[in-house]
Amino acid sequence: MPLRLATAGIIAFSLTACATSTDYLEYRPKDRPQIVADRLLSAVRTCWFGDNGNGFSGYAYEPELASHTNRPRILIVRDDEPGGLPRLVIEASREKSRTSVKLFGPLLATPLGPRIQGDIKRWTSGQSDCS
């Protein structure tokens, strides 16, 4: 009997784990992935790392727009770890006849998270202004 309860508990936990939400944010712009990625790169360069880059000191961006997987990306990394794990990944791709922009990484869970989300939402809609 205890074995059956333990097995039932493991199965219930496994099903719950499968039902969790995604670990990324997604936006669906109308333009092609490369066009969106170019616009995002320009805005990231100007708004996050240019004169308006308040809050992004200590970070650098690394564009990977000529990707072999046809998923242009912008990586935000720590200045002191240029080859380290990205703190934020912005990835544009084509999925089911639509463009998808996905954001993921621990920087989203910091005080910069709301700004990042607001900026990316605005930029994927076609705007290029800084907040």
Image (cartoon, grey):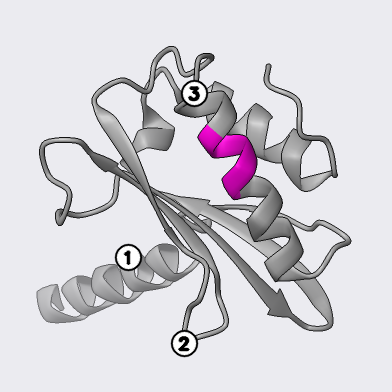
51 vs 129, left or right, is left
- Residue pointed to by mark 1: 13
Q: Main secondary structure of the magenta part?
A: helix
Does residue 68 sit above or below 42 in this rendering?
below
123 vs 76, left or right, is right
Say what secondary structure mark 1 lies in: helix
Q: Nearer the viewer, residue 87 or 53?
A: 53
- Residue pointed to by mark 3: 50
- Residue pointed to by mark 2: 68
Q: Residues within 10 Å of mark 1 (few under 14, many from 20)?
A: few
Q: List x then y, in percent, for residue 20.
A: 48, 58
Q: List x then y, in percent, for residue 78.
A: 21, 38
Mark before the other along the chain sequence, 1 or 3: 1
Q: Which residues are magenta?
A: 41-45
Q: List x then y, in percent, for residue 101.
A: 65, 59
Closer to the camera: disc 1 or disc 3?
Answer: 3
Q: What amino acid type is highlighted by mark number 2?
A: His
